[in-house]
């Protein structure tokens, strides 16, 4: 994902037409996610080539991870991101961590966990290389993730971001760096842990997206919040949020 996405965002509703956000759950859909991710990350030299043509890690099968995708009018996957939610400490579920941030930035996240609220994060953001609708795909994926984070009851939203992409996350997620960059597992670059207080910033973040994008997403995905909470049964333990 290049910085050019930030500067070429469309304000025309018609340019989102035919795109739809989905939860990739079936094996065939997941294989599409892994292949798309591989080609996108390889193009940016973020990973080394492998024989499978797939980029997978242990967190893809985590019980609080949901692969989100954008498909075009033909049903072909053109963008994907892994949305994950770490339940609060009071749930007593400490036999796993929802995403690699907990492995790489444990000292920083220890402070955020004191709020005893879910922590939402996005990772493995990938868009089909050379797709002419990269801007629209990026906007829909990120907006879907922001709404999902709110629906999960998360206090904090996180992302691990490398240098050239920091501006994008500052602008459309209101995120700020939480510490100095560190090397992430299975990746060739150092990444910065960025975060945002969802309670405080949600309305501001939503307002940062083009109106055409917000209107299109609301019309095409009216039950998105309910779909996300249904897909994360672990969060049912938190009770009413």
Image: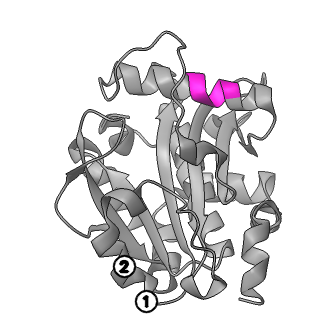
Residue at position x 69%, y 54% in the image:
217
Q: Residue at x 54, y 21 (%)?
A: 54
* Residue 32 in magenta stretch: yes
**Quadrant of the image occupied by residue 49:** top left
Q: Main secondary structure of the magenta part?
A: helix
Residue 27's place in the image compared with 155, above or below, is: above
Q: Residue 124: image x %, image y %?
A: 48, 41
Residue holding disc 1: 114
> 31 or 93, which is in the foreground?
93
Q: Pointer 1: residues within 10 angstroms few (<14), some, or many (20+)? A: few
- Which quadrant does the N terminus fall into? top left
- Disc 2 vs disc 1: Cβ atoms closer than 8 Å? yes
Q: For this view, does 185 lie left or right of residue 119?
A: left
Is the C terminus in the top left, top right, bottom left or bottom right quadrant? bottom right
Residue at the spot 64% in from the left edge and 80% down from the top edge: 153
Identify the residue position indicated by label 2 in the image: 110
């Amino acid at each position: 994902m290049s910085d050019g996405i930030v500067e070429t965002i469309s304000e025309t509703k018609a340019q989102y037409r035919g795109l739809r956000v989905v939860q990739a759950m079936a094996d065939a859909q997941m294989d599409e996610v892994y292949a798309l991710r591989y080609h996108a990350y390889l193009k940016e030299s973020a990973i080394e080539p492998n024989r499978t043509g797939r980029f997978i890690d242990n967190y893809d099968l985590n019980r609080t991870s949901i692969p989100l995708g954008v498909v075009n009018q033909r049903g072909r996957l053109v963008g994907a991101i892994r949305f994950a939610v770490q339940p609060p400490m009071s749930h007593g579920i400490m036999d796993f961590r929802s995403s690699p941030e907990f492995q790489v930035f444990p000292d920083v996240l220890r402070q955020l966990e004191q709020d005893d609220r879910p922590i939402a994060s996005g990772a493995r953001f990938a868009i089909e290389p050379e797709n002419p609708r990269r801007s629209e795909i990026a906007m829909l994926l990120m907006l879907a993730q922001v709404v999902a984070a709110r629906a999960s009851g998360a206090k904090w939203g996180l992302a691990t971001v490398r240098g050239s992409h920091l501006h994008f996350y500052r602008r459309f997620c209101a995120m700020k760096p939480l510490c100095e960059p560190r090397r992430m597992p299975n990746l060739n670059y150092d990444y910065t842990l960025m975060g945002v207080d969802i309670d405080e910033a949600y309305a501001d973040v939503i307002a940062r997206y083009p109106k055409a994008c917000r209107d299109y997403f609301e019309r095409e995905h009216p039950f998105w919040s309910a779909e996300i909470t249904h897909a994360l049964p672990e969060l049912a333990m938190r009770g009413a949020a």
